[in-house]
Image (spheres, rainbow, N blue to C red):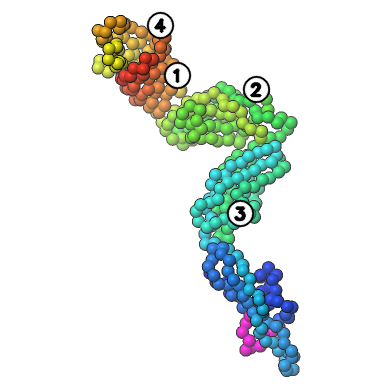
Amino acid sequence: MKLVTTLGCVAVAMMLLTLGCGGNPAPTRPSPSSPAASVGVTGPAHGIPVVTSWSCLTQSAARDGGIFATGVHEAACPAQSRSLLIDAALTAPGVPPNLTSSVNGTTVTLTWLVPTSLDPATSYVIEAGSSAGSTNIAVFDTLSAATSFTVTGVPAGTYFVRVRARNSAGTSAASNEVVVIVAGGPCAGAPNAPSALTVSVSGSSVSLSWIAPASGCAPTGYVVEAGSTPGASNLANVNTGSAATTFSAGGVPAGTYYVRVRAANGSGASGPSNETIVIVGTSASLTGRWVGVAPDGMIIEDAPGACDLELDLQLDLTQSGTTVTGTAITTTRRLSSTPGCRGGVDMWTLLNLTVGSGTISFSFQNQSGPGTIDFSGTFTATRMTGTLVTFGGRHGTFAVNRQ
């Protein structure tokens, strides 16, 4: 990159942040034979210091009484080299990742990471709006390459905030958006937990509803958490930015989601609501009777010298949304000759039944005695298969067909 301009001494001084050419020259019109004063910048671009040098026109004593009554000559300015940082970014910076926020009373602190792609950022632009993606509250440049920004005296409200990186070549796309909730009023604590979370699924659309906490500080928003296992939030952690007690999402991928809701205000978030299981992408219902008969019944394989049992398994299930209840009956079909082994018919209650997108797990509790059997497997509209572990540590398999 090379910058060349034709300037008089005063113009040169202004361009170089009022650093003059030395002395106090009074430039006048140069003689035709004098070369024009110039500023030359050489060196690599990309924000690397480069050395500048220039020459000045200085007034000389009158040489003749010509039309200008004076003459000029060009004299080199002594020791007038300066190092300047020339910002010559070729591309706008990448998106700043991992924007987060913290609130302490009415003080909001934002932090983010430096973009790792394209040319470096020299400052950042912070945007804030009253709804997702909007900028109706604030758009300003931090004028700094620092990756944090603190604002005090923020009025109570809910703010949707994002940040962009900037340099001389342009501005990046927006970072992830965070919802900042600043509480107002005398209540300084986090709200209590919401309750009665329920879910409905229609195709790939999911709707949640819950009941607001009945006491404690009022929430200004709710945080919806979703995970791939109970209690996890690895799939979603979204602040609704609203005190409404419903939330809907479309285009949800097929899968099984463990979902809960927390109430939030500027002082923090509550404990979780009850957790509900959201199943997207399966039309198979478990309601009905599932029967296992030879050779597809439940088979328990025991250690040598103990009882080997082969049982016919019957499941009677009722599914309502993501809630499944039911009972099981096992009937001995084959019993080993080991002394003390007992066969017969047993009734079982289903516990901890969890249904996913084509997956199922549950436990049996014997209605006439202690002990449970843990099952896990997969199912279609007509068949269910899986493995089991009994209370004695025995392992086996099961397969049942819809009757």
Tell me where residue 225 appears, x and y as whole percent. 53, 32
Q: Give the range drawn in magenta.
A: 28-37
Which circle, 3 or 2, is nearer the viewer?
Answer: 3
Local secondary structure at mark 1: strand
| Label 1 close to label 2 by CB (< 8 Å) | no
Quarter of the image containing the C terminus? top left
Res 368 label: 4
Circle 3 residue: 145
Circle 1 residue: 352
- Confirm whether residue 202 shows in the render: no
Circle 2 residue: 214
Which sits earlier in the primary sequence, circle 4 or circle 3? 3
The answer to which image quadrant residue 338 occupies is top left
Tell me which amino acid carries mark 4.
Answer: Ser
Q: Residue at x 54, y 53 (%)?
A: 172
Tell me where residue 206 appears, x and y as whole percent. 49, 31
Local secondary structure at mark 4: loop
Tell me which amino acid carries mark 3.
Answer: Ala
Look at the picture and state if 85 lies above or below 307. Answer: below
Look at the picture and state if 20 lies above or below 121. Answer: below
Tell me where residue 379 appears, x and y as whole percent. 35, 24
